[in-house]
Image (cartoon, coloured by chain):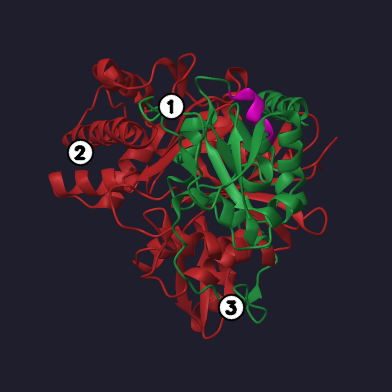
């Protein structure tokens, strides 16, 4: 059974790292829906409208043939994820908590249509997940592009244990006074708090 | 010492930033350069108090000392990064980068301390892959005992410099190997890309034009140059290539915005914030503003102001530090 979730306003689905504009549709299996508490909560809040996708043509009684059908196009976002998502980790992504900041017409619509994945390394800057240890993070950042990262070999060990390294530090060290950075951090944390569900 | 560390992995320099007491930030920096020597040079290096690494059957001298030693031996220093990415031509790159990063980061304050490191966005003007680059640095940072997070270089400028604009703006990092550009709306990366031109491209272009070497042009730049008032043929050539670089970056913002982000509607004008070592040349910002004003009419994004980062050289490492610190709740 396939569920159709129609967005009634611009929203971001944190666990899927997906942004939906008004009227956009996300389709998923019943099982995916049943295991995703965020989707269920959004439906309860009325931000998503749940319907069951009909498998075939359905006769619509009472509609005369001459009545023109609405020509308003429905945008569809098809999202397939094959990996087990780390729900908790993904939910902690600050970027996903900032959906409230995006208001129309900035609306998430443009963002959903790809800029985040415009470069293959576009990273979620506020991710709390170590990139190397959470494949879900990697897969979600390129989700919209539909492209897989090319297969690359990374040596299992780069730092050599056998090299003899001088004990004297090689880097030069300096101190810098910067109060603006503290302000930046406070502002970022305030945003984070403000957008916590 | 506070938790969290930022790391700027640049073609010319590696810089780490860590919060110290009060509003102080500890910055550790190393030139991205090395030279290999036979083991027979060990005695001489010791006499000269030069730090080195014994790696297999040769010695490696890293950082600023590598430049001095290279001059001493009449050789060119080797660079583990080229055009912003790990150099495929240097077989010792990974070993060298591992040692350099370990030294620049130091020991983590606790196991798995969060470390945000910069990676470039995929270039739009050449076919280069950043996946391997990201994977290697993720592995190195992890092996150093940190929890690695890769983040876009130009976005770091946004996080360090645009708090008052709610982290909205265009960050441009003029580096040595490439120029990175990101458009952010309230911390969300709306558009990011890089162009494979930076300080090195200026050096090479100017060198070809006047018949010198790229190293010589770099030295002229680092010695101090006023782009608006060049005093020699070399300086004039450097100014010319600077202008071409800025034009190339701005033209690509227009092009990429039209292609990928033309549908982004911005509520209000946003600033352009410029950082990176290549932007340190005398008169750079005046120069940049002049070029920008000549293109403003056709620029697709409303710009409130064009400004230099407070600390252009360290803006990326500081932005990475902000990101690393926000991983820890007070």
Q: Nearer the viewer, residue B74 or A65?
A: A65
Q: Which residues are magenta?
A: A97-102
Badge 2 marks a residue whose secondary structure is helix
Local packing at callout 2 (Cα closer than 10 Å; few below 14, some 14-19, many 20+) is many
Q: Which residue is mark 1?
A: B264
Badge 3 marks a residue whose secondary structure is strand
Q: Which residue is mark 2?
A: B234
Name the tint of chain A in the rendering: green
Q: Chain of mark 1?
A: B
Local packing at callout 1 (Cα closer than 10 Å; few below 14, some 14-19, many 20+) is many
Residue B50 in view of the camera: no
Chain coloured red in the rendered structure:
B
Do the residues marked 2 and 1 share a common chain?
Answer: yes
- Mark sitting earlier along the chain (2/1): 2
Local packing at callout 3 (Cα closer than 10 Å; few below 14, some 14-19, many 20+) is some
User: Relative to B140, is B190 above or below?
Assistant: above
The residue depicted at 55 percent of the width and 56 percent of the height is: A80
User: Relative to B2, is A30 above or below?
Assistant: below
x, y percentage for residue A159?
62, 72
The residue depicted at 54 percent of the width and 20 percent of the height is: A104
Q: CA distance from mark 2 to mark 1?
A: 42 Å
Do the residues marked 3 and 2 share a common chain?
Answer: yes
């Amino acid at each position: 059974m396939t569920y159709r979730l129609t967005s009634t306003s611009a929203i971001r689905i944190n666990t899927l790292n997906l942004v939906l504009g008004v009227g956009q549709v996300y389709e998923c299996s019943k099982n995916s829906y049943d295991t995703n508490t965020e989707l269920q909560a959004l439906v309860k809040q009325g931000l998503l409208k749940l319907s069951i996708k009909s498998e075939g043509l359905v006769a619509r009684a009472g509609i005369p043939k001459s009545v023109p059908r609405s020509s308003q196009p429905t945008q569809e976002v098809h999202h397939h994820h094959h990996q087990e998502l780390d729900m908790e980790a993904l939910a902690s992504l600050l970027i996903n908590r900032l959906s409230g900041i995006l208001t129309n017409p900035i609306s998430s619509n443009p963002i959903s249509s790809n800029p985040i994945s415009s470069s293959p390394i576009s990273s979620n800057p506020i991710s709390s997940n170590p990139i190397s240890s959470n494949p879900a993070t990697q897969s979600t950042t390129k989700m919209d592009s539909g492209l897989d990262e090319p297969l690359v070999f990374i040596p299992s060990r780069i730092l050599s244990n056998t090299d003899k390294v001088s004990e004297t530090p090689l880097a030069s060290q300096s101190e810098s006074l910067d109060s603006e950075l503290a302000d930046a951090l406070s502002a970022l944390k305030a945003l984070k708090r403000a957008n916590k569900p | 010492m506070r938790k969290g560390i930022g790391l700027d992995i640049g073609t010319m320099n590696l810089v780490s930033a860590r919060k110290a007491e009060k509003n102080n930030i500890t910055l550790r920096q190393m030139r991205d350069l090395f030279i290999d020597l036979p083991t027979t040079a060990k005695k001489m290096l010791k006499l000269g108090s030069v730090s080195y690494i014994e790696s297999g059957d040769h010695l490696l001298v890293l950082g600023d000392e590598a430049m001095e030693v290279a001059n001493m031996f009449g050789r060119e220093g080797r660079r583990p990064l080229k055009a912003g990415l790990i150099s495929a031509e240097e077989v010792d790159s990974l070993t060298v980068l591992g040692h350099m990063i370990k030294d620049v980061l130091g020991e983590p304050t606790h196991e798995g301390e969060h470390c945000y490191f910069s990676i470039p966005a995929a270039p739009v003007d050449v076919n280069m892959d950043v996946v391997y680059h990201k994977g290697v640095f993720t592995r190195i940072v992890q092996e150093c005992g940190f929890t690695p997070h890769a983040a876009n270089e130009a976005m770091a400028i946004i996080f360090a410099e645009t708090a008052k604009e709610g982290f909205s703006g265009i960050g441009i990092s003029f580096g040595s190997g490439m120029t990175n550009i990101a458009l952010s709306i309230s911390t969300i990366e709306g558009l990011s890309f890089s162009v494979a031109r930076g300080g090195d491209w200026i050096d090479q272009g100017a060198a070809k034009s006047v018949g010198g070497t790229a190293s010589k042009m770099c030295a002229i730049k680092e010695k101090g140059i006023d782009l608006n008032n060049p005093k020699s043929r070399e300086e004039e050539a450097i100014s010319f290539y600077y202008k071409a670089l800025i034009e190339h970056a701005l033209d690509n913002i227009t092009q990429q915005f039209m292609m990928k982000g033309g549908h982004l509607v911005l509520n209000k004008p946003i600033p352009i914030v410029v950082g990176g070592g290549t932007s340190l040349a005398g008169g750079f910002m005046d120069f940049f503003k002049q070029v920008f004003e000549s293109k403003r009419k056709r620029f697709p994004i409303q710009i409130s102001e064009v400004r230099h980062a407070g600390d252009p050289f360290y803006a990326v490492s500081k932005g990475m530090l902000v990101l690393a610190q926000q991983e820890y709740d007070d």
